[in-house]
Amino acid sequence: MKKLNSFWTVALSVLLLDILSKQAVLNYLKLGESVDLGLLSIVHVRNTGIAFGLFQGASWIFALIAGTVVLYLCFCYRSFSSSEWPVLGLVMAGAAGNLIDRIFFGSVVDFIDFGFWPAFNVADSAITVAIIWLLVVELRKMLRDVQND
């Protein structure tokens, strides 16, 4: 059996974690119900918009965008450097995880709640980590270029 590359390993692992965590919330918490864990709460909420609850009611538009991202990454990730594959895997997992929710539920299942921040999920976290990762990489490149001038 051929070994999975880092893109697929990250994407499938994070996607599985996202699906399993959302399924646990669906199995054990009714919509709106929460469990206080001290530093954070696990709360069952739905989001038909995007990050921070923006653009509510446009779930189908975001499903189309996520579907496009997933298809693009499935077919084009190899055109990127293999060092970029793990971060692309995070983007893939995040887009796919929330796309699956939008297809099956018409909204995204969010459940991690720190109280001072809108609730989010593993897929959202994967996308956020990928964005931060890419920003840090680009910032390091810019600083290296400035130092070389």
Image (cartoon, helix red, strand yellow):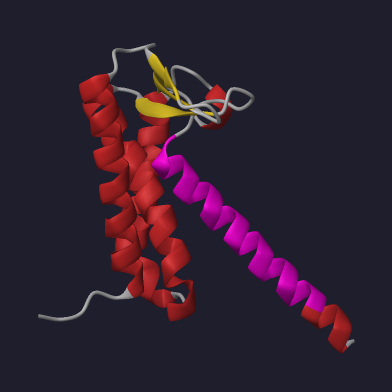
Task: Give coordinates of residue 76: x percent, y percent.
Answer: 36, 68
Residue at screen point 20% across, 79% down: 3
Task: Give coordinates of residue 72: x percent, y percent.
Answer: 36, 58
Q: Residue 126, relative to residue 36: is it above or below? A: below
Task: Give coordinates of residue 149: x percent, y percent.
Answer: 90, 87
Please state the total of marks drawn on the protein image.
Answer: 0
Q: Is residue 140 magenta?
A: yes
Task: Give coordinates of residue 29: x percent, y percent.
Answer: 29, 18
Which of 3 and 70 lies nearest the eye of the viewer? Answer: 3
The magenta-colored residue range is: 121-143
Residue at screen point 61% across, 27% down: 117
Q: Residue furthest right?
A: 149
Q: Is residue 34 magenta?
A: no
Residue at screen point 81% across, 75% down: 143
Quadrant occupied by the N terminus: bottom left
Indicate left or right for 76 with 140 as reference: left
